[in-house]
Image (cartoon, grey):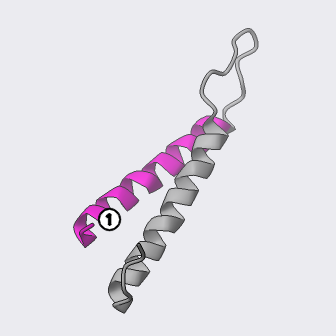
Amino acid sequence: MSVTLTLIILAVAVAALVFCGWRGAQPPPLLKVRMVPWRFLMILSVVLIVYLLVHLTRVYSGAAPVG
């Protein structure tokens, strides 16, 4: 995966993290069920961000790809 694509996906993941954090902090509606698990999506965004940061570190350090 190219560095440009990695940085674009990283930016989208950070934006998703911020959005999910904001939506998860909103008070739940009284008579409705919250259908989107915002906190779980926020955790998935964090996992993706960590994975992409490790990938960028490996690309810039010159390490051999795994797999």
Residue at 59%, 47% (x, y): give it: 42
Residue at 44%, 53% (x, y): give it: 13
Quadrant position of the C terminus in the picture: bottom left
Residue 6 image position (x, y, % from top left): 32, 65
Depth check, front residue: 56 or 29:
56
For label 1, count other residues whose C-alpha is less than 10 Å away and answer few (under 14), some (14-19) or many (20+): some
Residue at 51%, 43% (x, y): give it: 19
Residue 49 image position (x, y, % from top left): 49, 62
Is residue 16 part of the magenta span, yes or no? yes
Above or below, 46 relative to 32: below
Depth check, front residue: 16 or 58:
58
Residue for badge 1: 6
Horizontal placement of 3 versus 40: left or right?
A: left
Element type at mark 1:
helix
Residue at 35%, 57% (x, y): give it: 9
Residue 43 image position (x, y, % from top left): 62, 50
Amino acid on which the number 1 mark rests in the picture: Thr
In magenta, the rendered stretch is 1-24
Is residue 20 part of the magenta span, yes or no? yes
For this orientation, the residue located farthest to the front is 67
Magenta-drawn stretch, dominant element (helix, strand or loop): helix
